[in-house]
Amino acid sequence: MNQRPRPHDVPFRRFAFELPARTESVSRARRLAEERLILWGCDGDIRDTVALVVSELVTNAVVHTASARIVCEIREGEDRLRIAVRDEGGPAGPRIRECGEEERGRGLILVDALCASWGADRTGHGTAQIVWAELAHGMGEPC
């Protein structure tokens, strides 16, 4: 009988990095994510999507929080690839907002459209939070 592995038996890969919360860190975060996914053997489509999601989540942390630094984590599990960005807090949690003709303000709309799910969790340390997004990918297959 073929049994599905229990959650603690499922291998996963994890990559995390910390950057200063400055605008130039957005391109660095995107590059670090892309390089790691290349090492993991992920195809171009998933790399492009992850790079865009990382860019949007890091940009939100840089622009909308009072953080001095951010931590980005990419974790590949059995059927999900999770991107999480931890900041040091700000006045309000992430929200999708109408942006009209402006180019700015579309980050979470893109994340919502590209990802299977996304959300934000307070870390328990002041106003710090983790904004995360998950992409579905092949059951147990490497990305």
Image: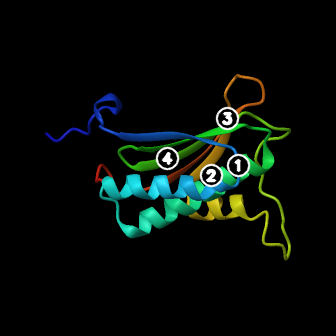
Q: Which residue is mark 3?
A: 121
- Is the residue under label 1 in contact with that under label 3 (CB below 8 Å)? no
Compare marks 4 and 2 and give the one earlier in the sequence: 2
Q: Residue furthest top?
A: 125
x then y, percent, for residue 49? 51, 64
Compare marks 1 and 4 and give the one earlier in the sequence: 1
Q: Amino acid at mark 1?
A: Arg
The residue lying at 53 percent from left, 47 percent from top is 83
Q: Nearer the viewer, mark 3 or mark 2?
A: 2
Q: Which residue is mark 1?
A: 22
The residue lying at 83 percent from left, 73 percent from top is 102
- Is the residue under label 1 in contact with that under label 2 (CB below 8 Å)? yes
Compare marks 3 and 4 and give the one earlier in the sequence: 4
Work out whether 22 lies above or below 51: above
Q: Is residue 90 left or right of residue 27?
A: right
Q: Nearer the viewer, mark 1 or mark 4?
A: 1
Q: Which residue is mark 2?
A: 25
Q: Secondary structure at mark 3?
A: strand
Q: CA distance from mark 4 to mark 2?
A: 20 Å
Q: Residues within 10 Å of mark 1 (few under 14, many from 20)?
A: some
Q: Secondary structure at mark 4?
A: strand
Q: Quadrant of residue 41?
A: bottom left
The residue lying at 65 percent from left, 57 percent from top is 56
Q: Secondary structure at mark 2?
A: helix
Q: Quadrant of residue 143?
A: bottom left
Compare marks 3 and 2 and give the one earlier in the sequence: 2
* Residue 36 visible to the viewer: yes
x then y, percent, for residue 69? 67, 38
Q: CA distance from mark 1 to mark 4?
A: 23 Å
Q: Which residue is mark 4?
A: 82
Q: Amino acid at mark 2?
A: Ser
Q: CA distance from mark 2 to mark 1?
A: 5 Å
